[in-house]
Amino acid sequence: MEAYEKIHRLHELIETRTVADLPGPYKVGVDLGTADVVLVVTDETGNPVAGSMRWASVVKDGLVVDFRGAMVIVEELKAEVEELMGVTLEKGATAIPPGTVGRNAMACGHVIAGAGLEPVCQVDEPVAAAEALGITHGIVVDIGGGTTGIAVLRNGELVFTADEPTGGTHVSLVLAGAYKISFEEAELLKRDPAQHRKIMPVILPVVEKMATVVKNMLIGYEEFSDYPVYVVGGTAYLQGFETEFGKAFGRKVHVPPHPLLVTPLGIAMFG
Ligand code: ATP
């Protein structure tokens, strides 16, 4: 299966709460994000088998702030997928924003262990995204809820990573201020594609700021200037995002289908 086909398939499996009829052994990945928690199961070759997600606020700027809440959600997602698949999931991979160190870096592993999944691997989020996209050469930008991370790959080797605390949360904060609504209402407004044309002028400065953040991360790395750029993460769902981000970044960028599911799919591939 091609990378984009896998992403479409995972989306379909999550939406329809169904399971792909593929034989084990299976790999599991858990993405503990600022805005959501996603659990994905793939077969040995990375084809999606099942998945489940929940909107949640158990992580802030890439750090687990509600350990117990995160554990309960992973337990629920695991139970849901196990029931659909009729198997017990025993181990899984997690991911963290690049540069997360010490106890913060260990928290995701502890969360999934508490939920009954033995942690087998922890990768940088944009590295997981690159794996899902099947990229061995290029720049992957992962704009999640709280963080913007990048990974640069050259001939299959990871040569640069960076992370900054900016993401979709900042978009929602700007919307909340502009429309005088709560953060939660702003999140819903932002996730409604029918509103995207209306809100783009309001949030354009945030999108431009994100592009500037990524541009600044790459200062001094002119050798990457002709690398293809892929932008993943839920924020890239915004209609017009690809064009506006590309304009401010000064380079053409590619947004894959269902950008929120790319990193979770890639994490499972490391499971
Ligand atoms: P992080 O990696 O920063 O910890 P995360 O893993 O939660 O965060 P993602 O799941 O990639 O990040 O993306 C979540 C962000 O995407 C949230 O800010 C959410 O509001 C936004 N988002 C999700 N769906 C949409 C949509 N349809 N349109 C616009 N934004 C969206």
Image (cartoon, rainbow, N blue to C red):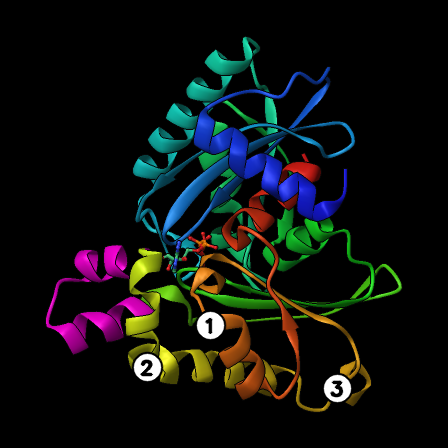
Residue 201: mark: 2
- Nearest to the eye among marks 2 and 3: give it: 2
Q: Where does the image place residue 202, in percent across and percent down from the top left?
A: 28, 80
Q: Which image quadrant for residue 46? A: top right
Question: Residues under labels 2 and 3: Cα distance?
Answer: 31 Å
Work out which residue is located at the far left of the displayed protein and give it.
Answer: 180
Going 53% across and 56% down the picture, which residue do you hit? 102
Is 186 magenta? The answer is yes
Q: CA distance from mark 1 to mark 2?
A: 10 Å
**In the picture provided, is 171 more to the left or to the right than 91?**
left
Q: Residue 114: in sight, yes or no?
A: no
* Disc marking residue 221: 3
Around disc 2, counting alpha carbons within 10 Å, would you say few (fewer than 14), some (14 to 19), or many (20 or more)? few
Residue 225: name its quadrant.
bottom right
Residue 238 or residue 38, whichever sits in front: 238
Mark 1 secondary-structure assignment:
loop
- Disc 3 marks a residue whose amino acid type is Tyr
Q: Which mark is residue 104?
A: none
Amino acid type at circle 1 is Gly
Residue interval drawn in magenta? 171-191
Q: Which corner quadrant holds the C terminus?
A: top right
Whether residue 111 can be seen here? yes
Which percent across, then down, holds residue 13? 53, 29
Q: Residue furthest top?
A: 86
User: Which corner quadrant holds the N terminus?
Assistant: top right
Q: Is residue 188 left or right of residue 210?
A: left
Q: Is residue 121 above or below residue 255?
A: above
Q: Position of residue 77 (x, y in %)?
A: 42, 27
Q: Which residue is mark 1?
A: 240
